Image (cartoon, grey):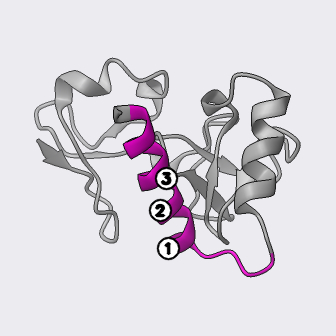
Amino acid sequence: MTKCSTANCAKYFHPKCIEEYDTKKLFKYIDANSLHFRCSLHYCNICGISGDTMSIFQCVRCPKALHTRCMDKEKVVKISKKQFICDSHFKNKKDLKKVSERFVTPTNTLKKFIKAEKIEMKKKEK
């Protein structure tokens, strides 16, 4: 496994697994002879520009990120100031609305979201 080279990023990836992501074009290798790279969470999935100069949101379920200006706010669920769930995790608008109502409240915190996700995963395992 290789860690993203961005200082504050704690994401690790298998080089082979990167090829399976639809965001693989956004994994920017620092040089061709090494495995050092910046992961796709630092580049907008729509325009391809980095989040260095403008605010970027990161999906909590996959390695996808979007600038606020590129984001279709009707197709995502904002979790916090920097995190969201992207539209690829919803089958339809009904699912999106259901998740939105459940997680997006004025008192929402990421801890509440993670706890609810764990409960959902346990239900699916049964």
Q: CA distance from mark 1 to mark 3?
A: 10 Å
On residue 117, the disc is 3
Q: Quadrant of the N terminus?
A: top left
Tag 1 near tag 3, CB within 8 Å = no
For the residues labelled 2 and 1, say whether their Cβ atoms are less than 8 Å apart: yes
Contact (CB < 8 A) between labels 2 and 3? yes
Kind of residue at disc 2: Ile
- Report the side of 30 relative to 44 (left or right): left
- Where residue 97 appears, as percent x and y from the top left, is 83, 42
Whether residue 68 appears in this view of the structure is no
Q: Earlier in the sequence, mark 1 or mark 3?
A: 1
The span shown in magenta is 106-124
Residue pointed to by mark 1: 111
Q: Residues within 10 Å of mark 1 (few under 14, many from 20)?
A: few
- Please state which amino acid type lies under the numbered disc 3: Glu
Query: Mark 3: which secondary structure?
Result: helix
Report if residue 96 lies within the magenta region.
Answer: no
Helix, strand or loop under label 1: helix
Q: Residue at x 65, y 40 (%)?
A: 86
Within the image, what quadrant is residue 72 found in? top right
Q: Nearer the viewer, residue 75 or 23?
A: 75
Residue 114 horizontal/vertical position (percent): 47, 62
Instruction: Name the residue furthest front.
Output: 126
Determine whether the residue tagged by mark 2 lies in a helix, strand or loop: helix
Is 78 displayed left or right of 3 in the figure? right
Which quadrant: the C terminus? top left
Residue 120 in percent (x, y) is at: 49, 46
Looking at the picture, does residue 64 appear above or below residue 108? above
Q: How many marks?
A: 3
Q: Is residue 119 magenta?
A: yes
Q: Which residue is mark 2?
A: 114
Examine the residues drawn in magenta and state their main secondary structure. helix
